Amino acid sequence: MNKINSDYNFLLKLKHWQLFFFLLGIPLLLELIGIILIHPTNIYDVLNINLYLMPIIISVIMLFLFRWFWSVGIILYKKISFDMNLKRFKAALLFSFTYMILFLFFILSVFLAFVNRKEGFPSIVNIIILALYLFSILCLIYVVHFISKLLIGMKLGRRPFIKEYVGCFFLLLFFPVGIWFIQPKINGLTR
């Protein structure tokens, strides 16, 4: 249990530039290393490499971002004095993360099927995927709402009103710019 809490605290104690580096710097380095190791000879080779690397790189970014969301939500929830629905937060975050990763690889398979001139998916499958995608986006909006409400609620010491945490909400939505402003606040609250 202490190992898990130290992992969560590690993410919350990062400086804003360190978090930014983990979220964007490492994935970009992975892409550059992939391109250098494969030695593309023309632009089409680079595009082909990116076709296969991009879902992996986006998955790394999402894994770290969602882990950060999880850490902020769990640690700050333990420190608030008002009640919020932690189970709904966990379910929304897990559904959104799982679906986004599966969606990335689904899009890759659809693109590869299109390139290879194979038949696409039936329209009912596309409708189901679209509905799940929209639900996943709603779950992600709920996660950002939950975290912004926790952050401002901890600062105020009570349940905040919407007008009090809407700024934090939009900062979290506008990733990665919001990280530069939110992470220092989290550093101050978790000390």
Image (cartoon, rainbow, N blue to C red):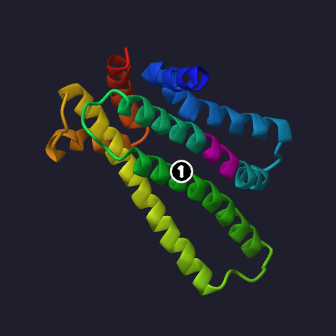
- Residue 161's image quarter? top left
State yes or no: residue 57 in magenta.
yes
Q: Name the residue type under label 1.
A: Leu
In the depicted structure, whether residue 108 falls above or below residue 183: below
Q: Is residue 97 above or below residue 131?
A: above
Picture coordinates of residue 49 (x, y %)? 76, 50
Q: Nearer the viewer, residue 30 or 43?
A: 30
Kind of element beneath mark 1: helix
**Magenta stretch?**
54-60
Residue plotted at (36% across, 52% down): 142
Which residue is drawn at the image coordinates 57% and 29% (left, top)?
22
Residue highlighted by disc 1: 94
Depth check, front residue: 7 or 57: 7
Instruction: Tell me: 2 left or right of 181.
Output: right
Picture quadrant of residue 26: top right
Task: Name the quarter where the N terminus is drawn.
Answer: top right
* Residue 163 spot, x, y in % from top left: 15, 44
Task: Tell me how many marks there are.
Answer: 1
